[in-house]
Amino acid sequence: MKSRTKRRDFLKKSLVSTAGILAAPMIIPSSAMGLNGKICPSDKINMGFIGVGGMGTGHVKRFLEYKDVNVRGICDVRKEHRLRAKSLVDDKYGNKDCFVKNDFREFLSRKDIDAVLIATPDHWHALIGIEAARQHKDMYYEKPLTRYFNEANAVKDAVNRSGVVFQHGTQQRSDERYRRACELVRNERIGKLEKVIVGSAGYSQVPTQPEQPIPEGFDYNMWLGPAPVSPYTKVRCTRHFTLIYDYSLGCISGAYGIHDIDCVQWALDADGSGPMEIEGTGKIAEDGLFDTIGEWKTIHTYENGVQLIYTDHISARTKYPEYNLNSMGIIFLGSEGWISVSRQSIDAHPKSILTSVIGSNEIRLPISNDHRRNFLDSVKSRQKPMCPVEIAVSSDAVCHQADIAIRLGRKVFWDPKRQQFKNDETANKMLTGSMRSPWHL
């Protein structure tokens, strides 16, 4: 930041001293002319991408479509992934200027990057996010926030200390269907909200995999990072990492559930808060590679008495077929009707709810129809995006509550203000995980 400030001051002085000489306009980079480190609205944002597997590469493709983005660099522990993403950038821009790195620390130390997208496995999110904040990089941060809940507040503190823009990748807040459903619930179009049902993804088990040779060009030790040492298998290092407990909470969180949980928090006006009591049951596989919870039902009770029934979508569709939930999604049940919403559809009973007009004097939720665009606009304006870090923390907490209640096999009580369980040392210990040396918060 000091080097940017010095360069900015120098350029400003130079422009003044040469004002009578230069006849043609001069174009100054945003890093030089932005006020207080801001990027000028008319300038390009230099972006870097950390983690370019399937999800990360998809983001590269989409961000390349924005005219005010310059994709500057790619970081991944797999050479194959790095080069694949770089080729997309090179082809788009017609040059070879995009740089590649293996180590995120070296990558984030670059001064020619304004913002980063983080799409690594879940167990890496906190460490990379904290370093990005330390290096003053705005970030689009893929869900979930963290593998262990204690890491969530560490990320929040780092983001707030640095003042960077943080957009959590729970993009359903930028989906018109979900916004519409949440506005209707907030304005009591279904009467008094009584219960919410969320059906998340599930999975099929695979056998324990035999150890395989580590592919050339893959820094597997770096991929593991803070996680325990485990023998390399191809399946472990595909998108299925989300189903292995060393790296993720599975379908309860990063493999899908955090999306709908986040929207439930939105509909209940519970951002920064959350449920008070949590209990539930679930199945944890004893054999096979995957050991996250795949079938479950938890009940989260909020202070106002509303209950969130959180389950896998197969159970939700089987137990509640009358609400037309055709895939993963949410059912809001009120005293005068219901609304169901998913990424494919929105339905209600009575149907007239769907055409109800929200008045100017009623609750209106912020509008974004493009989560990435919303992030870029926030980078320029320095305003909060749709899903800032504080919202990410409270939504993430609900997923951790569910996982811990199931594994303990008993009811637990949550204190939203202190963000820990009440008088429960065993449950609170489960909010914290160890990291393999030399990694630490």
Image: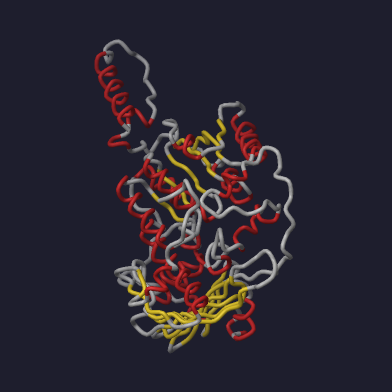
Of 32 and 150, nearer the camera is 150
Image coordinates of residue 70 in percent, x first then y, are 50, 35
Could you tell me which residue is drawn at 55 percent across and 50 percent down? Answer: 120
Count of numbered labels shown in the rendering:
0
Could you tell me which residue is drawn at 37 percent across and 85 percent down? Answer: 305
Q: Locate the N terminus and report the quarter of the image it occupies.
A: top left
Residue at the far top in the pictured view: 21
Of 258 and 150, nearer the camera is 150
The type of colouring in the image is secondary structure
Image coordinates of residue 159 in percent, x first then y, are 35, 50
Could you tell me which residue is drawn at 67 percent across and 37 percent down? Answer: 217
Left or right? Give the position of 423 relative to 146.
left
Left or right? Give the position of 397 relative to 61.
left
Q: Is residue 47 above or below residue 139?
A: above
Image coordinates of residue 131 in percent, x first then y, are 41, 44
Left or right? Give the position of 302 relative to 328.
left
